[in-house]
Image (spheres, rainbow, N blue to C red):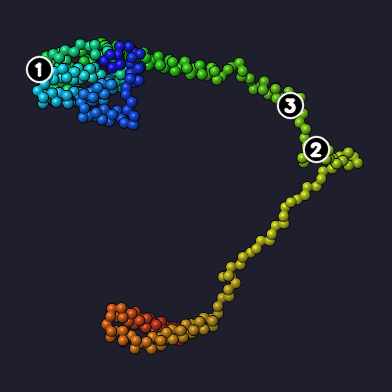
């Protein structure tokens, strides 16, 4: 059933079932899938009325059909009238409903489509300037065919009484839904909570005392039954000694750091250590001087790597000589 053919609220409830299955596509993409075929696009868009998307896509499809007919020099008046009617029906839905403090589309969506389409549309009384879906090219075509209208308004302003009645019906529908929810919640609470079954805390306490008096609790010490108990000459139960399974603790090992065991060096050992170091440095200096001939050959060859090695060798000689002087001065001062 098309939106224009709806007459009762039952038809409104069945509206979603008549819409096509879009699959994984969204509604705009599903309609735009038929963009190349304007007639098919118009048919698909009509199935999504009274959504704003349905009005918009229907008007776009009609514009494409009118454009094609203009190029072919064919009559397009019927398509232009259909476009104008869609724009007029869409103007019956305001942006916001002040009385209910709700968006206007919520009320408009609950009105049967036949109620809206049954409203008379007069171009001279309605005009085109306040119709959102009419653009300049549409207005030029309307004026060329029917002339300038007497006034410009919307369908909602012309039939305010019809819209007011729709607001009342929508408000009553909301109240009925709220009452149904409250009744459902009370029924569920009555099922879950039965006052006749609930017992007071005093009755529960009395019942526990009676049960405890009827069934005395037999206490068994150390997990022994009566057959395994042993008695002495006076008839007293002999309690077996409890064997301790605890293992003896291992002695704690104290780790002594090596730093603590090391002996602090004396002054004599320090002086001997410096003498050894000076001998090592002097030996290195002698070895460097012996290699002087090799250094000269590398410099004379002129390669970059040889010069680099030579400079490094000279730096080593300077460093060794300076360190040797420092060590000897320290030894003399001591």
Near-viewer residue (157 or 144): 144
Q: Quadrant of residue 240?
A: top right
The earlier-in-sequence mark between 2 and 3 is 3
Q: Quadrant of residue 305?
A: bottom left
Give the residue displayed 42% in from the left and 84% down from the top.
284
Mark 3 against mark 1, which lies toward the viewer?
1
Near-viewer residue (305 or 201): 305
Give the residue displayed 29% in from the left and 28% down from the top.
27
- Circle number at residue 212: 3
Secondary structure found at label 1: helix
The earlier-in-sequence mark between 2 and 1 is 1
Q: Position of residue 177 (x, y in %)?
A: 40, 16
Secondary structure found at label 2: loop
Q: Position of residue 46 (x, y in %)?
A: 26, 21
The earlier-in-sequence mark between 3 and 1 is 1
Spatial distance from mark 2 to mark 3, Cα to Cα?
A: 22 Å
The residue singled out by tag 1 in the image is 145
The residue singled out by tag 2 in the image is 225
In the image, is 173 to the left or to the right of 117?
Answer: right
Give the residue displayed 61% in from the left and 65% down from the top.
255
Spatial distance from mark 2 to mark 1, Cα to Cα?
A: 112 Å
Q: Quadrant of residue 95?
A: top left
Give the residue displayed 17% in from the left and 24% down from the top.
65
Above/below status of 243 relative to 266: above
Mark 2 against mark 3, which lies toward the viewer?
2
**Quadrant the N terminus occupies:** top left
Camera sees residue 109: yes
């Amino acid at each position: 059933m098309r939106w224009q053919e709806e007459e009762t609220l039952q038809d409104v409830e069945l509206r979603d079932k008549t819409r096509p299955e879009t699959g994984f596509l969204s509604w705009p993409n599903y309609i735009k899938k038929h963009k190349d075929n304007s007639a098919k696009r118009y048919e698909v868009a009509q199935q999504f009325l009274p959504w704003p998307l349905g009005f918009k896509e229907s008007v776009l499809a009609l514009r494409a059909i009118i454009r094609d007919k203009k190029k072919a020099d064919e009559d397009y008046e019927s398509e232009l009238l259909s476009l104008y009617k869609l724009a007029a029906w869409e103007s019956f839905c305001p942006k916001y409903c002040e009385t209910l403090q709700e968006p206007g589309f919520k009320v408009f969506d609950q009105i049967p489509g036949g109620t809206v389409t049954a409203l008379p549309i007069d171009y001279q009384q309605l005009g085109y300037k306040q119709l959102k879906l009419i653009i300049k090219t549409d207005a030029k075509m309307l004026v060329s065919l029917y002339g300038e209208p007497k006034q410009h308004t919307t369908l909602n302003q012309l039939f305010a009484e019809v819209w007011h009645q729709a607001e009342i019906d929508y408000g009553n529908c909301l109240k009925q839904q709220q009452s149904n929810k409250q009744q459902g919640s009370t029924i569920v609470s009555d099922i879950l909570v039965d006052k006749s079954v609930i017992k007071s805390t005093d009755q529960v306490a009395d019942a526990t005392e009676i049960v405890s008096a009827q069934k005395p609790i037999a206490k068994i010490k150390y997990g022994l039954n009566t057959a395994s108990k042993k008695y002495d000459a006076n008839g007293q139960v002999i309690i077996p000694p409890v064997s301790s399974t605890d293992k003896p603790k291992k002695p704690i090992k104290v780790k002594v750091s090596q730093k603590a065991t090391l002996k602090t060096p004396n002054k004599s050992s320090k002086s001997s250590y410096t003498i050894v170091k000076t001998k090592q440095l002097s030996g290195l200096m002698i070895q460097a001087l012996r290699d002087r001939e090799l250094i000269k050959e590398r410099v004379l060859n002129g390669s970059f790597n040889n010069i680099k090695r030579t400079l490094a060798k000279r730096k080593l000689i300077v460093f060794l000589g300076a360190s040797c002087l420092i060590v000897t001065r320290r030894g003399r001062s001591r």
